[in-house]
Image: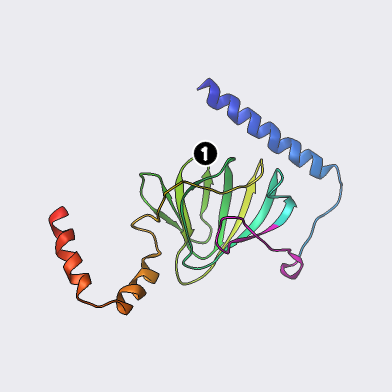
Amino acid sequence: MKIRSACFVVVAVAGISAGVAWAAKKEIVMQTPEELKWVDVPNAGGAQVANVTGDIFKGAYTALAKIPAGQVHPLHTHTAGATAVVISGTFWITPDGGVEKRLGPGSTFTVPGNIKHASGCAPGAPCLLYQTGAAKFDMKPVAGAAAPAAAPAAAPAAAKPAAAPAAPAPAAAPAAAPKK
């Protein structure tokens, strides 16, 4: 419990320090959607971020994140924790060994650092998130991880069986039935 409290104090001090440094500039920061500078997130297959304050890849930040519709981020971790608000689309998160939760507009989530999880944007519409963190953002894939079975990526997989012969799919179904 003392370690948890100490971690909270360290994160709070880091966040306050970042806020104090930003506030010391004594300027209002304003950006229209056209002024945002979107950059690719490494190891994220097309996801992009635009800094609002700070720099998401260097330290404390607030940023917008765009994730393509249907994109799956298999099991991974982040060095530091992050908190986000879903602005549009349906973002989902599945903790390692846990149950997937779908988060629509207005939903919030916090992922502590070094927690294994899968995440992504459900098919249908891209996701837009407002995200903040007290330290730089990274995405570290877990070796050998595959997308969770319940991931929304199942829609693209449905296109694959249509291209494959229909006979192998029914043969696979009886094999799955005895496992129940």
Q: Which residue is label 1 attached to?
A: 114
Residue 175 seen by the camera: yes
- Asked whether 147 or 68 is in front, the reply is 147
Identify whether 124 is placed above or below 142.
below
Q: Where is residue 109 in the image (x, y as percent from the top left)?
A: 52, 49
Q: Which residue lies furthest to the top in this view?
A: 2
Q: Quadrant of residue 167?
A: bottom left
Q: Which residue is drawn at 55% across and 39% down?
A: 113
Residue 180 seen by the camera: no
Q: In this view, does 48 lie to the left or right of 96?
A: right
- Asked whether 84 or 135 is in front, the reply is 135
Element under disc 1: loop
Q: Where is residue 93 in the image (x, y as percent from the top left)?
A: 45, 52
Q: Which residue is drawn at 58% across and 64% down?
A: 46
Identify whether 67 is placed above or below 132.
below
Label 1 neighbour load within 10 Å: few <14, some 14-19, many 20+ = few
Q: Magenta includes 86? A: no
* Quadrant, the C terminus: bottom left
- Asked whether 87 or 151 is in front, the reply is 151
Total tally of numbered discs in the picture:
1
- Asked whether 108 or 64 is in front, the reply is 64
Q: Position of residue 148 (x, y in %)?
A: 37, 54
Q: Magenta includes 49? A: yes
Q: Residue at x 56, y 25 (%)?
A: 5
Q: What stretch is highlighted in magenta?
A: 32-50
Q: In which quarter of the image is residue 122?
A: bottom left
Q: Position of residue 127 (x, y in %)?
A: 54, 64
Q: In this view, does 16 lie to the left or right of 100?
A: right
